Image (cartoon, grey):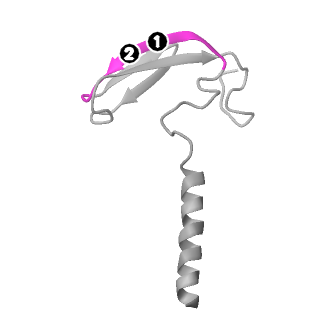
Amino acid sequence: MKTTAYLLLLLLLGSVVLLVGCSANPTEPAENDPPDVEEPIATATIGAGGGTIDAEGIVLSVPAGAFDADETISLYRSKESKPFGTDQITDE
């Protein structure tokens, strides 16, 4: 009897944890995505064959197979002076 009660309690707790942990839709962007930015400095459509997008000395290479279908990729310049915090490499 104790074993059944423990199993039911474990099942109940596991269900609660699962429901709480999976309540948000992971495909929706976070409220602050993208960060405080202006218009994109570059935009490209990259498909299953891969490709590159570059602007202002930044080159983003996407390898073949990274996407199953065409995706629109954009590069933005942040309005923040240190968008990645204080521990970053800059050209300043």
Give residue 47's position: percent from left, percent from top. Answer: 28, 25
Q: Foreground residue, 70 or 77?
A: 70
Left or right: where does residue 90 sit relative to residue 49? right
In the depicted structure, whether residue 6 falls above or below residue 66: below
Q: Which residue is mark 1?
A: 42
Q: Which residue is mark 2?
A: 44
Residue 39 magenta-highlighted: yes
In the depicted structure, whether residue 41 falls above or below residue 71: above
Question: Dividing the image into 4 quarters, which one contains the C terminus?
Answer: top right
In the rendering, which numbered label is found on residue 91?
none
Q: Foreground residue, 55 or 41?
A: 41
Under circle 2, the secondary element is strand
Instruction: Please tell me in which quadrant of the rendered image residue 68 appears.
Output: top left
- Tell me which secondary structure the magenta stretch mostly adopts: strand
Instruction: Name the residue: 52% across, 39% down.
Output: 25
Magenta span of residues: 36-49
Residue density around tag 2, few if under 14, some if 14–19, many if 20 or more, within 10 Å: some
Under circle 1, the secondary element is strand
In the depicted structure, whether residue 55 falls above or below residue 61: above
Give residue 50's position: percent from left, percent from top. Answer: 29, 28
**Mark 2 near mark 1, Cβ–Cβ under 8 Å?**
yes
As measured in the structure, the alpha-carbon distance from the residue carrying label 2 to the one carrying label 1 is 7 Å
Give residue 49's position: percent from left, percent from top. Answer: 24, 28
Left or right: where does residue 88 sit relative to residue 70? right
Instruction: Name the residue: 69% across, 15% down.
Output: 79
What's the amino acid at mark 1? Answer: Ala
Outermost residue, front side: 1
What's the amino acid at mark 2? Answer: Ala
Instruction: Please tell me in which quadrant of the rendered image residue 59 appears.
Output: top left
Instruction: Please tell me in which quadrant of the rendered image residue 61 appears.
Output: top left
